Image: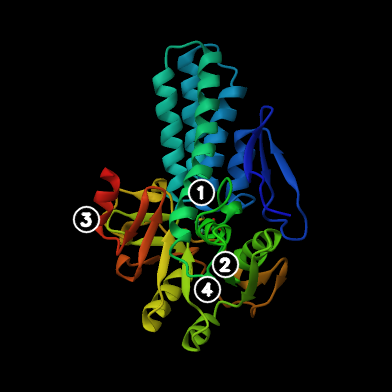
């Protein structure tokens, strides 16, 4: 069965999303009715992946507007500003969250002074545009990025940058889908991606649904496989890209990039322009989320680490731009991304 539904959507006054904490065992859809529920869903990763988080935040703002009891534009904008603050406190690294919130705030500002129902409708339209543009951008990346993948390639990916991490189709997995749709025979190796296992639980699940050949490997296997010539390229997504091309993505991505460089294997990053944070000079300034160490020391409720030993749990790492063979965006492919190449992209 092809994976062709929307991971997050608007459904009759509610925010509808697939609960990613239940996958792959159970496919369960949530219908969220309050901004607080939407914020919690992002925090506990019922929805995750940078573009999906951004789209969810946009829908959260539309939900706030649709539910607000405000009778005039000024009080509605105050409610929206409170919703924005709550949604912004959920996860710090994926810049798409802040990009979407700013876009919704700007749309609200433009409508200031209009009647409340008009503002509500305007914000819903804006959120739905964010969703549509996401899928279109991913399909464009799929076409241009797919062309970089050779027929018969074995492609390594890390974490989940698929349909589940976006509204649909995916960024890194969109590139893989694009290559497969172009008729190429592709085999994917999915890093399991400790500690949350997005690669094993989500990437493997959605590619398997699509009939794309996928094999799970544990995170420490890729170096040896590269040395044996069994990996042709790596494609990953991104949570935030600084203006110089340094890229934050799921913890372990940097290791993959270094291994690719050592073995002369192309390392591709696929991300929409909304993932580029033009305000940051370099990746050193990207805030890295530190999550609960129980994600490392426990499996479910069972402790697997010795009592009393602490664990680190940074959720993301930064790969220097110099290790990125090409950045695949909806505006085209940038080989050897750096500050100048990204500026050219912005002007395209
Ligand atoms: O912690 P997560 O699961 O939200 O992290 C997701 C990733 O790191 C993805 O690779 C990234 O958001 C790109 S998704 C298209």
Q: For the residues labelled 1 and 2, say whether their Cβ atoms are less than 8 Å apart.
A: no
Give me the residue at 53% from left, 41% from top.
Answer: 55
Specify which label sits upstream in the sequence, 4 or 1: 1
Closer to the eye: label 2 or 4? 4
CA–CA distance in space, label 2 to label 4: 36 Å
- Dot 4: what SS? loop
The quarter of the rendered structure image containing the N terminus is bottom right
**Alpha-carbon neighbours of circle 3 within 10 Å: few (<14), some, or many (≥20)?**
few
* Residue 271 x %, y %: 43, 54
- Left or right for 68, reference 18: left
Which of the two residues, 301 or 98, is positioned nearer the viewer here?
A: 98
Give me the residue at 26% from left, 43% from top.
Answer: 347
Residue beneath disc 4: 153
Give me the residue at 58% from left, 70% from top.
Answer: 188
Closer to the eye: label 2 or 3? 3
Specify which label sits upstream in the sequence, 1 or 3: 1
**Alpha-carbon neighbours of circle 4 within 10 Å: few (<14), some, or many (≥20)?**
some
* Residue 43 x %, y %: 58, 50
**Residue 316 higher or lower than 97, as above or below:** below
- Dot 3: what SS? helix
Specify which label sits upstream in the sequence, 1 or 2: 1
* Residue 173 x %, y %: 55, 59
Residue beneath disc 2: 293
**Residue 30 higher or lower than 242, as above or below:** above
The quarter of the rendered structure image containing the C terminus is top left
Residue beneath disc 1: 139
Specify which label sits upstream in the sequence, 4 or 3: 4
Specify which label sits upstream in the sequence, 2 or 3: 2
Residue beneath disc 3: 340
């Amino acid at each position: 069965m092809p994976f062709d539904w929307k991971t997050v959507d608007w459904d009759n006054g509610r925010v509808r999303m697939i609960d990613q904490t239940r996958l792959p065992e159970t496919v369960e859809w949530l219908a969220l009715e309050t901004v607080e529920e939407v914020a919690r869903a992002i925090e506990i990763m019922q929805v995750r992946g940078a573009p999906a988080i951004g789209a969810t935040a946009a829908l959260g703002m539309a939900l706030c507007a649709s539910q607000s009891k405000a009778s005039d534009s000024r009080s509605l904008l105050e409610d929206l500003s409170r919703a924005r603050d709550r949604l912004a406190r959920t996860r710090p690294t994926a810049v798409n969250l802040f990009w979407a919130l700013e876009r919704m705030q700007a749309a609200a500002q433009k409508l200031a002074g209009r009647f409340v129902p008009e503002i509500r409708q305007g914000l819903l339209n804006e959120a739905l545009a964010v969703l549509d543009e996401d899928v279109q951008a991913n399909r464009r990346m799929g076409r241009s990025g797919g062309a970089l993948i050779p027929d018969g390639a074995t492609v390594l990916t890390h974490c989940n940058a698929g349909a589940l991490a976006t509204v649909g189709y995916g960024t890194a997995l969109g590139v893989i889908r694009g290559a497969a749709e172009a008729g190429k025979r592709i085999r994917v190796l999915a890093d399991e991606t400790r500690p949350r296992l997005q690669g094993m639980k989500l990437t493997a699940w959605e590619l398997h649904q699509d009939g794309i050949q996928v094999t799970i490997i544990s995170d420490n296997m890729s170096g040896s496989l590269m040395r044996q010539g069994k990996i042709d390229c790596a494609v990953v997504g991104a949570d935030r890209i600084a203006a110089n091309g340094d890229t934050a993505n799921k913890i372990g991505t940097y290791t993959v990039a270094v291994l690719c460089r050592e073995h002369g294997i192309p390392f591709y990053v696929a991300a929409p322009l909304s993932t580029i944070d033009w305000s940051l000079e370099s990746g050193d300034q990207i805030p890295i989320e530190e999550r609960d160490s129980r994600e490392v020391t426990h499996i479910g409720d069972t402790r697997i680490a010795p009592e009393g030993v602490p664990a680190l749990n940074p959720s993301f790492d930064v790969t220097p731009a110099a290790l990125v063979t090409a950045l695949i965006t909806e505006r085209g492919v940038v080989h050897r991304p750096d500050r100048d190449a990204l500026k050219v992209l912005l002007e395209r």
